[in-house]
Amino acid sequence: MADDPYPAQRVLEWDDADSLLEIIDPYLLFYLRWSGRLQALAEG
């Protein structure tokens, strides 16, 4: 959806072949790794 108006500002990319969600933005990836939110989601 945001690919049309803002092609250079992609944050996530979905790979249909591998059913894989890729985080392209390094700042978002850093935030997710160090914020503890992924751990909180994993613990339920």
Image (spheres, grey):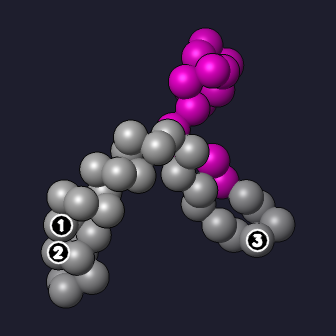
- Find disc 2 in the rendering and name its residue: 40
- Find disc 1 in the rendering and name its residue: 36
Q: Which quadrant is the N terminus positioned in? A: top right
Read off the magenta span. Answer: 1-14
**Gap in angstroms between the C-alphas marked 3 and 2:** 26 Å
Say above or below: 20 vs 15: below
Identify which amino acid the numbered label 1 is placed on: Gly
Q: Residue 36 falls in which quadrant of the image? A: bottom left
Look at the numbered discs 1 and 2 and tell me whether their residues touch, using CB distance below 8 Å.
Answer: yes
Identify which amino acid the numbered label 3 is placed on: Asp
For the residue carrying disc 2, how many other residues have a C-alpha within 10 Å: few (<14), some (14-19), or many (20+)? few
Residue ID at (82%, 66%):
17
For numbered disc 2, what is the local secondary structure? helix
Residue ID at (27%, 82%):
42
Q: Which of marks 3 and 2 is nearer the N terminus?
A: 3
For numbered disc 1, what is the local secondary structure? loop
Nearer the observer: mark 1 or 3; the answer is 1
Residue 11 shown left or right of residue 42 in the figure: right
- Find disc 3 in the rendering and name its residue: 18
